[in-house]
Amino acid sequence: MTQKYFLLVSTFQVLNFPGATTEVLFHVQEEQEEDTLIGSLGDNFPSPTPLKYKLLTYTNYFHLDSQSGNLYTTADKLDRESLCPLDTEDQCSMTLDVFILSQEHSEFTKVTLFILDINDNQPYFSESIYTISIPEDTAIGTSFVIDQFAKDLDIDHNADLSYQLISPDDVFTLDQHVEFLMLILLRPLDRESHSEHRMGLIAYDNGFPRLSGSATLVVQIIDVNDNCPVFLTSNVSVTLPRNKSVGDRVVQLQAVDADDGENGVIEYYYSTRVAESIKKHFTLDHSSGLLTLSEPLQDEVMRYRLSVIAVGLGCFPAVALVTINLENIQKKPKIEVRFIASHNKGGISIQEDVPPGTIIAILDIIDPDVSISRPLFINESSPFYLRSSDSSSDTFLLLTSSPLDFELKEQYDITIIGNSIINESFTVTETVKIQIEDVNDNNPTFLNHLEEIVIEENNVPGDLLLTLSASDEDSGSNGDISYYLLDGDPKVFSIDSESGTLKVSISLDREMRSSYIVHAIAIDHGLPSMNDSCVIAIEVLDQNDNPPTFASNEFTFFIPEDLPYQGEVGYINVTDVDSGSNGDVSVHLINTTSLFSMGQDRTLRLEGPLDYEKVVMYELWLEARDKGSPSLTSQVKALVVVLDVNDNAPFIVLPESNFSYVLVPPDTLQGSSVTKVHAIDYDAGLNGVITYTEYGEISPSANLFKVDANTGNIILKESTNSHHCGLYQLLVKASDQGYPEVLSTIVWVNILLNQSISNRSYVESLIMMSKTSVMQENQVITLEPCLKSPPAMAQFSWSLTAPVVLAIMSVSIICCMAGTLLFLCSRRNSKKEKQSPDVQLPLQINVDCYTKDWDEVKSCDPPDGSGPL
């Protein structure tokens, strides 16, 4: 409980009053009127001087008189149930703090107020209606527990409850226990008289005045099969006219069973004593008990007696006797119809394809008094006529007079008339309904026997193409039409047999198939069935769904390095299976180069010079683009391999010049290699394969040396001695294997066969003089044997006495040497980019970045590190 306290500003000396108590107890009943005196604090604090009282606890329920110390209630009434909702005993209390002051003394004290309960709350039930179910065959004295107690917010005797049952018919009574209530049956139950019992259940408390609360107790009686069927009338007699028609009502029998549900179900049957000859004239409905006429009544019978039983579940049957009396009526002339054709309750049914003259019925005139004139006639125009029978004048035949057509008219109601001879105003008539039955004599017919439709490829499976519609003038099943496909793959197209909707079952691909011819048939349900067919031409329209396709994943072209300008490098074979502009393809170079160009005819052509010795292969990326919207593209890599042409002659590396020489001692062993000719060729393949041959010789002794054709080694063929000493000059030719033209280079090999060189200048002068002679291929020039001393070597076949000749030779030699030096320098500068002078690989690829994907090429760095290609 929230309490507020007043703050005393002044400070007092707190002393105890003589004989005063520290806590004051008061008792007050709830719901007291305003200003009701609860008690006085002055009685608890005697003092010779006046006292003042101050209530420190803030409350809406009490006020304290400051002079007398009397405690009173306020306008806010006390409600124990709201102040102490959880207390179940008389312990609901409130505590107040009071400050007492006199001229000499002051004190704090607590006032405890116990709030006493009064009977101000009536008992109540949590539900206003309680329902229980009891079988009607429950024995007297049976008890049923009612677990529904009332509640009372008061306490003690105010909440002690007792119960009373208000039962108007005294069928039940109530027995109260501590834990539950017992409902006790006092009288037998009968659901058929009372299906439920409504009683009042009242709860009283023991307070003063006594308060009560009530609820309704509903006891529903569950039915048991304790009743059997009983006819309301056990003897039934009816009079029936003889002209009653088949199906007319004769009598309604009724039995009752007081039970409910399945226990009260009644079925009606003929007794076993009823003859079959009587049963066939009447139909008894087993569930309703309605008796109807099933056959025409016999003239000679005057009365029928029937025994009918009513049967219920688990009961003996109830019996009712039914007497049917037939009226006597005067016989009048009439026309009876005997049907030849099939008939029903509505009349005659004949098919429309019966031929004229078909007998459909026989008409007999029943005329005891012979009052009807003959012949009979039909009073309206129809495709029928009457013909008298040869056997009797009272018999007539009804025949068809012309072809029938169901589609023109489905039914004829013809009236056959016989006039009275006695009374002209009296006629005998008989109406015959003739129903024309349809036969399947009309084909289904398509509105269009050729349907042309178009559909784009890549459609959604299940797309509707069209709805076929055929009509059939026949009716019923003869006019019901089903649609089928005569041919075609059912996985491609499907048709709904009832609606005729033609759908495509798959996603079409024009590149696989551009058109379809489908034959559909409409078949009616007649017997035999008839049909009609139509042709459906389906054209598949192209979509740009196929990119151009190159004939190869990578093109490789081999071209000679001397291919002329605008020469054809190769043809780019690319196709696009789409049609029209979707399949119109153009090809262009992605990595643009001035050396190659792509023509409109898809031919790759050369636009500049090639040099196999510089670049042996070019990697190009081509893109093919169609003209669809949006256009599709494909890329492919094309490698252009430059084939070597024999455009480089062998280059002599050893000896270094035509004027160099080598000293060979005479005692060199036979077969030794004394020197070597080595040449290189910057061409590839056979164009770079070099062989060596001896082209000429100037020597003292012929055939002393030989040249190895493959290695260029100069080999001593035989043993030598001092007799062989001298200067040997071999002219060696280095030739490649080029085709169609072989290129070669000739070099002098100077060999001095001697122990040592005593006069180097003399030797060099001899070598220089010998270069002035013009050698022919395979010419051998023989020198005389040299002496051991240099003067002996001066004996040479050349004339040294002609100064003019020597001068000319000297100038020639100097010019040759200068030209040779200039040629060697220019060749070395042009070949300095070569990787190796000794090794040439055919079709060498001089690129460091080699991929098969253009995107990879674009991101690949060249060897020089200059960035992406």
Image: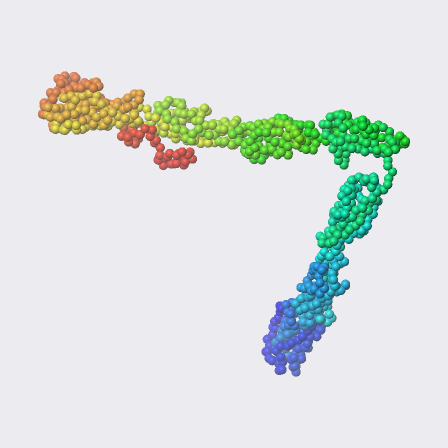
Whether residue 278 sits left or right of residue 736 in the image: it is: right
Q: Looking at the image, which is closer to me, 322 or 175?
A: 322
Q: How many marks?
A: 0
Is residue 220 something that shows in the picture?
no
Residue pictured at 61% horizontal, 76% vertical: 108
Image coordinates of residue 475 in percent, x first then y, are 70, 32
Image-quadrant location for residue 715: top left
Which image quadrant is residue 807 in?
top left
Does residue 768 appear to the left or right of 22 in the view shown?
left
The image quadrant of residue 335 is: top right
Q: Residue at x 82, y 41 (%)?
A: 301
Residue 78 lies left or right of residue 856; in this view the side is right
Q: Is residue 741 shown to the viewer in this render?
A: yes
Quarter of the figure with the C terminus: top left
Which residue is the extreme one toward the right? 422
- How far across and how far down the image is residue 515, in percent? 55, 28
Q: Nearer the viewer, residue 371 or 390?
A: 390
Position of residue 153 relative to residue 563, above or below, is: below
User: Coloured how?
Assistant: rainbow
Q: Position of residue 843 (x, y in %)?
A: 33, 29
Q: Residue at left 14%, top 16%?
A: 802
| 501 vs 86, nearest the viewer | 501
* Vertical comparison of 156 with 249: above or below: below
**Closer to the camera in the image, 732 or 426:** 426
Q: In which quadrant will I find the N terminus?
A: bottom right
At x 20% / y 23%, what residue is drawn? 748
Q: Position of residue 333 (x, y in %)?
A: 85, 34
